[in-house]
Image (tube, rainbow, N blue to C red):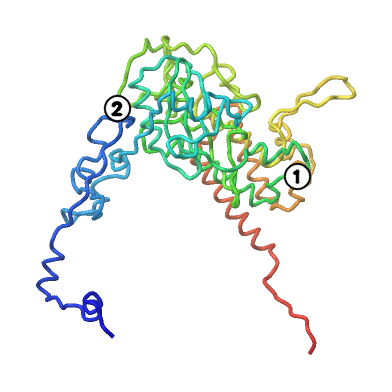
Amino acid sequence: MCKTKMAINAANPTRTSRSQRSQQAQTPRTQSPRPTPGPNSLSDNPSTSYSSGSISTGTAPYSGSTGYRLTSDTSFSSRTSLTSLRDTLPENPNIYDFSEICAATNNFLARRCSSSTPSWRCTLRGADVIVFQRKFRRKIQTSQLRELLSVICRSHHVSIIKLLGASISGDHIYLVYEFVYGASLSDCLRNKKNIHFTVLSTWMSRMQVATDLAHGLDYIHNKTGLNINFIHNHIKSSAIIVTEPSFNARVCHFGAAQLCGEIEIEIELEKEKLGEITEEASSPARSKQLLRSGSATSQFEGVRGYMSPEFMVTGIATQKSDVYAFGVVMLELLSGEEPLKFKFDERTKDFVKTSVIDTARAAVDVGDGGSVEAKLRRWVDRRLKDSFPIDVAERLTRVALECVHVDPDKRPNMGRVAGKISTLYLKSRNWSDSIKMPDITVSLGPR
């Protein structure tokens, strides 16, 4: 059989000497130039964009194709922190033109995704997104908005739906978030078509939601690493998406309160004076929240049942008001009931307001002489079919009641709450494993 030259070379490869191989290994590989950012890039700062395929950190450059290159015996992690490294990454948000938003939403004639907030699901620049329309609460400079948007878009957490970019038109801002398949927590707990059905029918599914939500809000408050004390200001069961198949929870609307002007934040990179400072928060968590005379905040937004007492009086949102709303959501998750509802009293012939906070306090109250276990089993959602660890349920209820304390100074911070709920999750996991049927197989057949 005749062999071609290629086949002969493949069967008998030429041998290369060790010196030739070493010379080839020492030959540096050329890097292909990275594409330059488009005109819609957020930042024009050359320090946050790729110029020659590497990120300059001052001590140990990172090459896009060859990895880390250490220049001394000291490790890279000891010289630069994760926060400073992330600040150099070119994760610029998208600044969408308003015509793109109009085209993607069919001039806002597409079907809305929410009845409470104008929102549309669409495709923008090849990504499946959801667009929320919100109105500015105060005037904000374009440069300041761009800078704040850049800071918020650098946040990453598995329990937070990522903000991709924004667009501005008149008095409205259009926030573009990634689209996540799932259902809101309120719909999961209260099915309008069948009140006796819930997808969260097991105790572990609800503990998974509680754990994810606690860690997500703890990240927003304490662990973004962006030198800003963020406040969510929209914590409610309808703003939490539950995904399948593991029933993980993700928080919506992160950054919306800051970008719309509901909450004013001073960014350390750029501080602009908008008016005379008339009041300054005294607590450490509110050290960067300033109320200015030049900020026209005549109205504040809140959802009935989730607003803390001090927020209803002052209209100023804080991290403690977020903790209050989180506690209400936890009580919703345990009982399956709405935060507030009105029942008709046959005796008084009038409607009586019932709060999930009041019913939870009555369930764990030991002063009336009743059994806490019996009262708690009647209070917890009956669709769980009485299958839950009673000690864990009681402790979780008490943690939620601490979060809804009338005095904001007596409410715990989210770091402490997340730690407690993580411990309760592990206890629940041990309980769930202990009640499982043993893995025993039985074969029936003739002998």
Report if the CB atoms under discs 1 and 2 are less than 8 Å apart. Answer: no
Which mark identifies residue 197?
1
> Along the line of sight, which residue is nearer the eye, 116 or 306?
116
| Quarter residue 81 falls in | top left
Q: Say which label, 1 or 2, has the lower sequence index.
A: 1
What's the amino acid at mark 2?
Leu
Q: Secondary structure at mark 1?
A: loop
Which residue in the rendered view is the most extreme toward the front?
2
Q: Residue furthest right?
A: 347
| Quarter of the image where one finds residue 241 | top right
Residue at (36% x, 13% y) in the render:
274
**What residue do we see at 69% from left, 53% from top?**
389
Identify the mark at residue 131; answer none if there is no mark.
Answer: none
Q: Secondary structure at mark 2?
A: loop
What separation in Å lies between label 1 and label 2 (alpha carbons)? Answer: 50 Å
Quarter of the image for the C terminus: give it: bottom right
Kind of residue indicated by mark 1 = Phe
- Which residue is tagged 2? 269
Residue 392 at x, y percent in the picture: 65, 50
Query: Could you say which is closer to the camera, residue 210 or residue 46?
Result: 46
Instruction: In the rendered view, tell whether residue 32 sits above or below residue 288.
Output: below
Image height check: is 16 above or below 413? below
Left or right of residue 324: residue 2: left
- Judge whether 165 appears above or below 429 on screen: above
